[in-house]
Image (cartoon, rainbow, N blue to C red):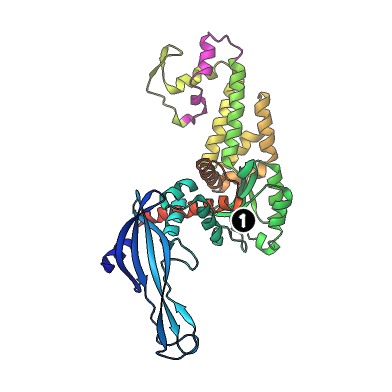
């Protein structure tokens, strides 16, 4: 019976012996209780060193919360830990087990299951329901694992990406990511200049000189930090932000041209409907297959549909040419083409002129974005993961728990990747 129960509960402690299984009513729940003992075997007294001086001194009983075999029926262990007393020194000793930590009534298996579940995108309340412990216990479990709260603070990655995201209580947090491994390097509780500078001041100049590239958005404040703290690093402006700025400018011009026409006209509908086609790469448009456009009431190809709208305004067509040229240059890492586009004197509306002025001002970062393989893609993906965790948890008030959940979720993602590679 003992071996059978130990196999079911996956208990490998050789000193564990089960004697009975009963069902009891515990706060209105039918609970399965496994009753057993933990024996203690000593040849000599650890205190005085004498042999064969022990007498049995009863048992110390403990009830332990264990993983449920059946989710509808909680499982408990009621174990008696054998006590021995030395006749020579009168010192007492009690049996120990690796099933549960000292001074704790929750089995290690329950804690391990809770931490494993927290690696997934589930709330702490759902984890507490599944494991049968309170949400406060889950919080204390996160607090107890200090390794979850510590980030590497001795060396800096060779290539890093920096960004910000909205964290607990609506405050923006500063995040640093290793741009080679996608590992979160550090998360600061705010994005204040004093906090960021205080953090980077901890590293020696020699260590900071090891950083070869820093990817960021077009935030001039972050670019100043990069130039100040990483003298050998190349500043890389995120390619997505470059295309995003040009896309927004194109949409503003398209809407402005569209409003010049009556809403009931064909020209208005040509610019208003199917607007996503204008944002696709020209190489993604179909030039041969026709479809019926119900707004224009005629058969057209995707390329013809875009051409009809661009023919309505020469500046809109020029903006489209600039947008397509920039996307192609970034995709093909063609520096010369991109620089020609930025420094050519275009006859453009104000939105495009503003974007061009910004990109020219940040030409160094734009140049590096074209020639280097790094971007803010990794950190943006991590930010999305963090937002999902916050949404599932309905927000966090404890910053430590917030960091622990992020670390656990990333650990679970990495473990899943390793399993798929096997």
Quick one: 111 or 368, which is closer to the camera?
111
Question: In the image, is residue 219 above or below residue 298?
Answer: below
User: Which residue is pictured at 58% across the width and 21% down the height?
Assistant: 254
Q: The N terminus is located in which quarter?
A: bottom left
Please give left or right for residue 92 compared with residue 364 in the image. left
Pinpoint residue 386: horizontal percent, then vertical percent: 54, 45
Q: The C terminus is located in which quarter?
A: bottom left
Question: In the image, is residue 203 above or below residue 298?
Answer: below
| Residue 260 part of the magenta-drawn span | yes
Pinpoint residue 312: horizontal percent, then vertical percent: 56, 15
Which residue position holds label 1?
Answer: 212
Q: Residue furthest bottom?
A: 50
User: Which residue is pictured at 59% across the width and 61% down the height?
Assistant: 152
| Residue 304 part of the magenta-drawn span | no
Mark 1 crowdedness (10 Å alpha carbons): few <14, some 14-19, many ≥20:
some
Helix, strand or loop at label 1? It is loop
Q: Which residues are magenta?
A: 259-282
Please give left or right for residue 400 compared with residue 133 in the image. right
Pinpoint residue 215: horizontal percent, then vertical percent: 61, 48
Question: In the image, is residue 422 above or below residue 247?
Answer: below
Quick one: 376 or 350, which is closer to the camera?
376
Question: In the image, is residue 301 above or below residue 53?
Answer: above
User: Which residue is pictured at 50% across the width and 17% down the height?
Assistant: 308
Residue 122 visible in the snapshot: no
């Amino acid at each position: 019976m003992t071996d059978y129960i130990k196999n079911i509960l996956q208990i490998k402690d050789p000193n564990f012996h089960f004697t009975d299984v009963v069902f009891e009513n515990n706060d209105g729940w039918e609970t399965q209780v496994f009753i057993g003992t933990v024996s203690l075997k000593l040849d000599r007294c650890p205190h005085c060193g004498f042999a064969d001086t022990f007498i049995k001194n009863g048992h110390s009983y403990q009830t332990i919360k264990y993983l449920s075999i059946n989710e509808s029926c909680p499982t408990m262990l009621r174990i008696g830990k054998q006590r021995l007393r030395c006749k020579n020194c009168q010192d007492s000793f009690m049996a120990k087990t690796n099933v549960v930590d000292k001074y704790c009534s929750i089995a290690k298996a329950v804690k391990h299951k809770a931490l494993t579940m927290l690696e997934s995108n589930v709330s702490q309340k759902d984890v507490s329901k599944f494991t049968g412990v309170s949400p406060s216990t889950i919080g204390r479990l996160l607090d107890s694992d200090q390794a979850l709260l510590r980030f590497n603070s001795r060396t800096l990655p060779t290539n890093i990406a920096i960004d910000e995201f909205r964290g607990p209580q609506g405050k923006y947090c500063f995040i640093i990511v290793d741009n080679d491994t996608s590992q979160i390097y550090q998360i600061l509780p705010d994005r204040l200049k004093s906090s960021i500078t205080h953090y980077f001041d901890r590293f020696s100049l020699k260590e900071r000189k090891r950083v070869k590239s820093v990817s960021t958005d077009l935030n001039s404040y972050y670019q100043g930090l990069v130039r100040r703290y990483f003298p050998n690093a190349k500043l890389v402006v995120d390619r997505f932000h470059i295309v995003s700025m040009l896309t927004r400018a194109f949409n503003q011009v398209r809407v402005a041209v569209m409003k010049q026409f009556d809403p009931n006209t064909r020209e208005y509908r040509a610019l208003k409907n199917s607007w996503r086609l204008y944002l696709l790469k020209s190489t993604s448009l179909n030039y041969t297959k026709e479809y019926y456009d119900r707004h224009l009431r005629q058969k057209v190809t995707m390329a013809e549909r875009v051409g009809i709208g661009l023919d309505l305004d020469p500046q809109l067509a020029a903006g489209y040419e600039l947008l397509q040229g920039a996307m192609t240059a970034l995709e093909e890492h063609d520096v010369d083409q991109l620089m020609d586009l930025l420094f050519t004197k275009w006859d453009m509306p104000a939105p495009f002129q503003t974007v061009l002025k910004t990109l020219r001002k940040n030409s160094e970062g734009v140049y590096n974005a074209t020639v280097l393989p790094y971007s803010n893609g990794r950190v943006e993906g991590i930010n999305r993961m963090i937002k999902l965790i916050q949404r599932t948890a309905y927000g966090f008030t404890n910053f430590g728990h917030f960091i622990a959940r992020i670390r656990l979720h990333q650990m679970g993602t990495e473990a899943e990747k390793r399993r798929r590679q096997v």
